[in-house]
Image (cartoon, rainbow, N blue to C red):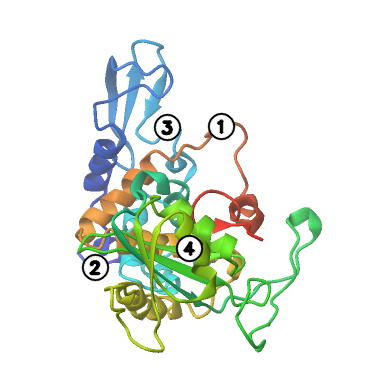
Amino acid sequence: MALSKESFLPDESDCAETWRRLRWPEGLKCPDCGSQDIQTRQKNHRHCFHRYCCRGCERWFTDTTDTFLEASNVSLSRWVYLIREMDKKRSINDIAKDLDLTYKTVLGMSHKVKEVIYDRREEWLDALTGEVEADDVHVKGGQQGREVSEEENGRTARTRGLSQRGRGSYEGDRPLVVSWVERGEEGPRVFELRRTAGKKSLLSSALSCVEEGSEVNTDTWNGYRLLEGAYDHRQVKHSERYVSEGGAHCNTAESEWSIFKPWLRTFRGLAKRHLYLYLSEHSFRRSHRHLSREERIEAVMSLMSFLCLWPEGPVETSKQASAPTAKIGSWGYVHYSS
């Protein structure tokens, strides 16, 4: 038998079995009435998924009912392959060739994975505690793409403000990214996009990521001044030393940029309206760096197994879900700030 692209995909039955285990950790349950009096009526109904009948409400359902997979024409094995290759930091173009799908389809799939990680961050990201470090950097992010009318969530095409002097800004295509790092081998890392670089903006970022009363180590930049009211704020003056006489330093947070910047460059430029998705994915991977790749894949699958097709009310369109105004201002990575 000749090798084909299907030969290198994960086994479909293994993926389906993992999906069932993650979606129903306490046993089969009817998605409508919650009854566990379930009868399996047909195995391997579609892509190795089973079909069931609830004896309580007599509803028929499958392993993918009321999830995003119910409306997806892409098999679960291809989704798992995509998640694994994203964890390897491969390009979307290469993954699309492996899956024999169009670039646009695989790009949309990758954005769906990123959106799930972002939207369900409260489940995998706890507030940082103990000894925490913070640092910041400005990244390049333009407004790429065609002109879009007001009816389509209007925006202008790609603009350039990268030659402006001084500290960058979101409007100038050099948005600020702040890293919050909890010390320790398994300490979580949070990378957060900020619209402005003011004191109130950074305080808001700290309050959403770090537990009040924790020790926070930063440099002497004026933007961190307001942290003193809510945290044990310690500073180090880098023009004089890397570690203060009191032992304060932010070397761990600074070292994260040596991993973050090469990773960001692999995308060959990002539209700033999507930057928050990439930051949340990187935060997830760095916060779970102590896990094996297989365990991280299962963690993402677990988040996606509870992604309902109709959460509450009408489903948001992809443009609504990816619009900066829909995400900036919510709890966590991106906020409107003055």
Query: Circle 2 is placed at which residue position?
Result: 3
* Nearer to us: label 3 or label 4: 4
Q: Is residue 43 left or right of residue 46?
A: left
Per the image, label 2 sits on a secondary structure element best described as loop
Q: Gap in Å between the C-alphas at discs 3 and 4?
A: 34 Å
Residue type at numbered disc 2: Leu
Per the image, label 3 sits on a secondary structure element best described as loop
Q: Gap in Å between the C-alphas at discs 1 and 3?
A: 15 Å
Find residue 173 and report its horizontal and vertical position in percent. Answer: 63, 76
Residue type at numbered disc 3: Thr
Of 43 and 231, the residue lying toward us: 231
How many C-alpha atoms fall within 10 Å of the one at disc 4: few (<14), some, or many (≥20)? many
Q: Residue furthest front?
A: 245
Quarter of the figure with the N terminus: bottom left
* Nearer to us: label 1 or label 4: 4
Q: Residue furthest top?
A: 56
Query: Circle 1 is placed at which residue position?
Result: 312
Query: Circle 4 is placed at which residue position?
Result: 192
Q: Earlier in the sequence, mark 3 or mark 4?
A: 3
